[in-house]
């Protein structure tokens, strides 16, 4: 069995098929990735932290009374409303389940409230 780059034999008709020789590829050079960002590729500057990460000191003071009185009342009122809503839901949820169990199940004619409608048919050997 001979191997030829110029021509090969087809398995169906036995005709010659022209094949181009494959050129050898050159190995590509390995290059390091370079980033173009900032001055001379400086990502984080310990000397100028505010310009690098942003200013975190928003209000300029570390006291606990940072907000005006009206804003403080707004936030505290929201927390009070949330606690009131949780307590309402804790009481209303089980109450709704009990009301449905008593009234809604009868209106929906669930089998447990209606009871058996007719005698159960007897099975083989006259047993249930």
Image (tube, rainbow, N blue to C red):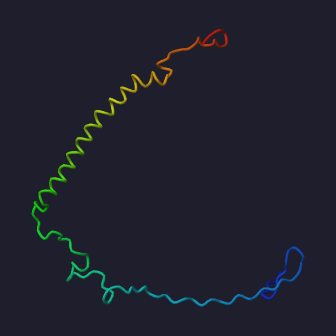
Quadrant showing the C terminus: top right
**Side of 84 where 22 appears, left or right:** right
Q: Nearer the viewer, residue 88 or 42?
A: 88
Residue depicted at x 65% and y 9%: 126
- Quadrant of the rendered image containing residue 103: top left
Task: Using the image, determine if residue 121 lies above or below residue 73.
Answer: above
Residue depicted at x 20% and y 71%: 56
Image coordinates of residue 24 in percent, x first then y, are: 65, 89
- In the rendered image, the residue lying farthest to the top is 126
Q: Nearer the viewer, residue 81 or 16?
A: 81
Image coordinates of residue 89 in percent, x first then y, are: 30, 37
Task: Using the image, determine if residue 68 lies above or below residue 36.
Answer: above
**Side of 69 where 25 appears, left or right:** right
Image coordinates of residue 60 in percent, x first then y, are: 13, 71
Quadrant showing the N terminus: bottom right
Q: Nearer the viewer, residue 55 or 9?
A: 55
The total of numbered circles placed on residues is 0
Residue depicted at x 23% and y 41%: 84
- In the rendered image, the residue lying farthest to the front is 70
**Side of 22 where 41 appears, left or right:** left
Image coordinates of residue 94 in percent, x first then y, are: 33, 31
- Quadrant of the rendered image containing residue 70: bottom left
């Amino acid at each position: 069995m001979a191997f030829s780059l110029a021509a090969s034999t087809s398995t169906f008709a036995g005709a010659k098929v022209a094949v181009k020789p494959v050129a050898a590829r050159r190995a590509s050079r390995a290059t390091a990735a370079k980033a173009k960002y900032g001055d001379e590729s400086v990502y984080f500057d310990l000397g100028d932290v505010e310009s690098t990460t942003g200013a975190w000191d928003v209000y300029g003071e570390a006291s606990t009374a940072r907000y005006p009185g009206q804003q403080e009342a707004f936030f505290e009122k929201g927390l009070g409303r949330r606690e009131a809503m949780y307590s309402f839901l804790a009481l209303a949820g089980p109450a709704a389940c009990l009301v449905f169990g008593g009234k809604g199940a009868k209106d929906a004619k669930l089998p447990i409230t209606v009871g058996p409608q007719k005698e159960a048919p007897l099975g083989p050997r006259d047993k249930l």
